[in-house]
Image: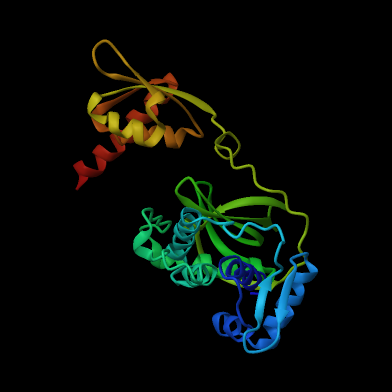
Amino acid sequence: MKLERMIGILSILLQKEKVTAPYLAEKFEVSRRTINRDIEALCMAGIPLVTEPGQKGGISIMEGYKIDRMLLSTSDMQAILAGLRSLDSVSGTNRYAQLMEKLSAGASNLLPGDAHIFIDLSSWYKDSLSPKIELLHGAISLGHKVSFIYFSPKGESKRTIEPYNLIFKWSSWYVWGFCETRQDFRLFKLGRMTDLQLGGAFQKREAPLPNLSSQEVFPPQYQVKAKIQPKYRWRLVEEYGPDSFSVLPDGTLLFSFGFVDKTNIVTWIASFGEGAELLEPFEFRKDVLAFAEGIRKNYLES
């Protein structure tokens, strides 16, 4: 890609005094003519590059031009490397690592073993998730619609969207796009999508950025209070944070948090078995009991 290549060329020139066009052409696997066009584009963008002919000639940044050749420190570059690796963890390729290698050309201290942070954005369902991400990324780049079957608590539906952004949030991957069914922008969870198909091209519209605050995406409808046994403290800390509960005089934990719907409340409380008691909303206590009775009935019948 031209932009990535131009950034790579500028990065190399910041680290080396002078390079040749054949060196850059080989590095980025393009022709010398392409490199010459990139150099011209960089000059037009305001970067004063000098091209010297001859055996000892080459391409360099004009002497005296005030640009910091240490624009990116070693720690900066390694942080970028960690981020790019995280993208490779879900794409199923090493495309981003190859890009980083080009950007860090000439910096021998940026070996993989020097990085102290590894970010893996994949999930237990990596084999099915990676193809979705690659397909959606391509659709966004090319401006193609995507159709799929979507599963939600309200049921199963066929959707067609104009995709605009891939988003990693709340430990899951989402796509933000304009939904033809709803005639509005919507956030779709990749784990709930099946049978993805590329559609025809679309004319990109003005796309607002999604509001990813929890209050917007998961607006609380019910304030829950529950008594939780101390042995489940780790779950409360992990799922809702240490401020989600207080310790009562008898050692039990008083949990308080906002939930989106009744189903989530009932199933969450039931997942603790005898280790939790729902206090509020009081009227949902009968639903928890009915849920438990349903489970009991199934096991008695079998």
Camera-side residue: 289 or 15?
15
Q: Is residue 209 above or below residue 279?
A: below
Residue farthest top in this picture: 249
Q: How many marks?
A: 0
Camera-side residue: 222 or 116?
116
Q: Is 196 on the left-hand or right-hand side of 47?
A: left
Quadrant for residue 13, please give it.
bottom right
Camera-side residue: 55 or 126?
55
Q: Is residue 255 above or below residue 53?
A: above
Q: For the point 58% across and 71% down, which residue is it?
A: 197
Q: For the point 67% across and 56% down, which residue is it?
A: 179
Q: For the point 64% across and 83% down, which residue is it?
A: 21
Tell me which colouring the rendered structure shows: rainbow
Camera-side residue: 262 or 76?
76
Q: For the point 77% across and 66% down, which residue is it?
A: 45
Look at the image and tell me whether residue 290 can be seen: no
Q: Is 248 on the left-hand or right-hand side of 206?
A: left
User: Which part of the image, by quadrant, shows the N terminus?
Assistant: bottom right
Q: Position of residue 91 (x, y in %)?
A: 47, 67
Q: Position of residue 220 (x, y in %)?
A: 54, 30
Q: Is residue 190 above or below residue 238?
A: below
Look at the image and tell me whether residue 95 can be seen: yes
Residue farthest right in this picture: 44
Q: Position of residue 188 (x, y in %)?
A: 57, 53
Q: Position of residue 141 (x, y in %)?
A: 65, 68
